[in-house]
Amino acid sequence: MLRKSDTPDVVDSFHYNDEAGAKTMAGILGSSHSKHSGLFVAAGERLKVGLVRYGEVFPHYDVNGSRIVVGQNGSHYSVRLENRTKKRIEVVLSVDGMNVLTGKAASPKQRGYVLNPKETYDVDGFRKNDTTTRAFVFGSVARSKAAASGGASNVGVIGLAVFEEDEARVKAELLKEQQARGGANAFPGAR
């Protein structure tokens, strides 16, 4: 995908924890908090996101603009990304400060998942290779993949860096491609 800019259009994040941890975090962030079910709007309203297991969405707390998803220790989960826009977007996704495609320290400059307009995609885990992932699992900081690679301070946060596609450049590249193909000769050796 051709991005409009090297800088994300929007960066957002949310937290996750078990029930006791989520309540504690909610109390620290603000006195009033409410628990909700379903996906929630994120990234400047470009996405609906949440954590899911077998299609069921984990509940979350809304606290002063922050979201904390409530999970259960030992449960695996997927990150659901739903493109709410009418454009293709790219989402660089981090879990515990690690890019889910590379397993390395996350940066918005890295590549992400391309979602077509209104498309929904569930990210099941850290990508190990083209066909295998390491599942996301709710657990302690000490047992996290991030802690194993020295990034324990980032456990419990999921990041989203969203880029819009540069539609004008895509059209120009497509036109250039079609012009090159239009002049192709099926039998160049016949001259």
Image (tube, rainbow, N blue to C red):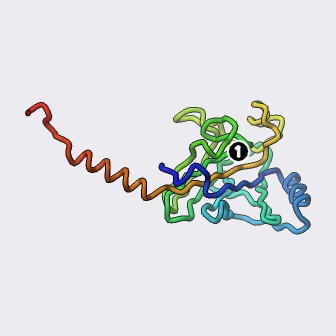
Q: Residue furthest left?
A: 191
Residue sitting at 74 percent across and 55 percent down? 14
Residue sitting at 53 percent across and 35 percent down? 131
Q: Is residue 126 left or right of residue 180?
A: right
Kind of residue at badge 1: Val
**135 w.r.t. 25: above or below:** above
Residue at the disc numbered 1 = 95
Instruction: Determine crowd level at label 1: few under 14, some 14-19, many 20+ residues with C-alpha closer than 10 A.
Output: many
- Check the picture and name the quadrant holding the C terminus: top left
**43 w.r.t. 183: above or below:** below
The residue lying toward the viewer, choosing from 138 and 183, is 183
Residue sitting at 56 percent across and 32 percent down? 129
The residue lying toward the viewer, choosing from 172 and 154, is 172
Residue sitting at 82 percent across and 68 percent down? 34
Q: Position of residue 141 (x, y in %)?
A: 83, 39
Q: Position of residue 130 (x, y in %)?
A: 52, 35
Which quadrant of the structure image shows residue 32?
A: bottom right
SS at mark 1 in the image: strand
The residue lying toward the viewer, choosing from 136 and 188, is 188
Number of numbered discs overlaid on the protein picture: 1
Q: Position of residue 90 (x, y in %)?
A: 55, 52
Q: Position of residue 25 (x, y in %)?
A: 87, 55
**167 w.r.t. 128: above or below:** below
The residue lying toward the viewer, choosing from 169 and 165, is 169
**138 w.r.t. 37: above or below:** above
